[in-house]
Image (cartoon, rainbow, N blue to C red):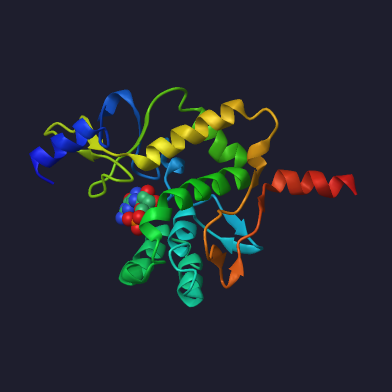
């Protein structure tokens, strides 16, 4: 991107500028807030009784509802970077509306990660307080923000993932009725995993509570 187009995007309000040492940076998964990254292991998900080991795998699998074999390969990986790598050569075959639904899909994936890892992921989100959350990226200034200065203190990007994380954090703060324990499927065509339409996702907490009632 050229300096001029960068400036235009900043002016249009799409790009955000952050001072690195004033924000919560999500960069390496081993760092303090690394668990907020989709690349973090240790936040397993269960979709229609199918185990998906990382949020990245779930997000990438959602590209290919019409290619269940590829979905299977993507979700079968322990390493989220490998899931993304498997997805890459097929990107041109992503669902045709991918660019217009990927934002909703990411928001849904984060809701699922929270519902099924409430203490760990929710706790980490709340521990960020009121600070901006920014996913630092070397290449991607749509989901994240890139360093733009020589000393590594200015990040510029749309930071869509960071903004979705902040949105979710604010929802947690207001969630006195535990509404976030349940996640409805997206209302988009072919929202499916391994040929099965994706159903309502429930937190394990809710499932255990319901079991105890009977
Ligand atoms: N390649 C890569 N390495 C990382 O360390 C990253 N955090 C990411 N970003 C994540 O990739 C996902 C977006 O993938 P698409 O480009 O839309 O296929 C999203 O989860 C980012 O957080 N990428």
User: Image point 50% across, 27% down: which residue?
Assistant: 127
Q: Is residue 162 visible?
A: yes
Residue 134 picture location, percent across and down: 34, 35
User: Image point 43% across, 64% down: which residue?
Assistant: 63
Instruction: Please tell me how many numbered marks the rendered image carries.
Output: 0
Image-quadrant location for residue 4: top left
Q: Nearer the viewer, residue 37 or 140?
A: 140
User: Image point 78% across, 47% down: which residue?
Assistant: 208
Q: Nearer the viewer, residue 2 or 11?
A: 11
Q: Nearer the viewer, residue 14 or 116?
A: 14
Residue 133 picture location, percent across and down: 38, 32
Image-quadrant location for residue 114: top right
Residue 58 picture location, percent across and down: 49, 58
Q: Is residue 60 left or right of residue 204?
A: left
Q: Nearer the viewer, residue 189 or 4?
A: 189
Check the image and report above or below for 75 versus 213: below
Q: Is residue 148 visible?
A: no
Q: Is residue 184 left or right of residue 134?
A: right
Residue 154 picture location, percent across and down: 20, 30
């Amino acid at each position: 991107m050229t300096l001029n187009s960068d400036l235009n995007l900043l002016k249009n309000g799409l790009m955000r500028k952050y001072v690195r040492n004033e924000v919560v940076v999500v960069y390496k998964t081993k760092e303090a807030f690394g668990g907020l990254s989709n690349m973090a292991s240790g936040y397993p998900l269960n979709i229609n009784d199918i185990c998906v080991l990382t949020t990245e795998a779930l997000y990438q699998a959602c590209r290919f509802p019409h290619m269940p074999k590829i979905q299977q390969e993507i979700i079968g990986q322990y390493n989220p970077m490998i899931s993304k790598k498997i997805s890459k050569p097929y990107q041109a075959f992503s669902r045709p509306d991918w660019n217009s639904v990927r934002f909703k899909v990411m928001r849904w994936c984060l809701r699922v990660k929270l519902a099924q890892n409430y203490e760990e992921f929710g706790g980490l989100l709340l521990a960020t307080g009121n600070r901006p959350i920014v996913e630092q990226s070397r290449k991607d200034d749509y989901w994240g923000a890139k360093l733009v200065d020589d000393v590594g203190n200015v990040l510029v990007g749309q930071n869509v993932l960071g903004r979705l994380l902040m949105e979710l954090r604010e929802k947690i703060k207001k969630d006195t009725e535990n509404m976030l324990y349940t996640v409805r499927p997206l209302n988009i065509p072919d929202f499916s995993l391994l040929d099965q339409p994706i159903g309502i996702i429930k937190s394990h907490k809710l499932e255990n509570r319901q079991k105890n009632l009977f």
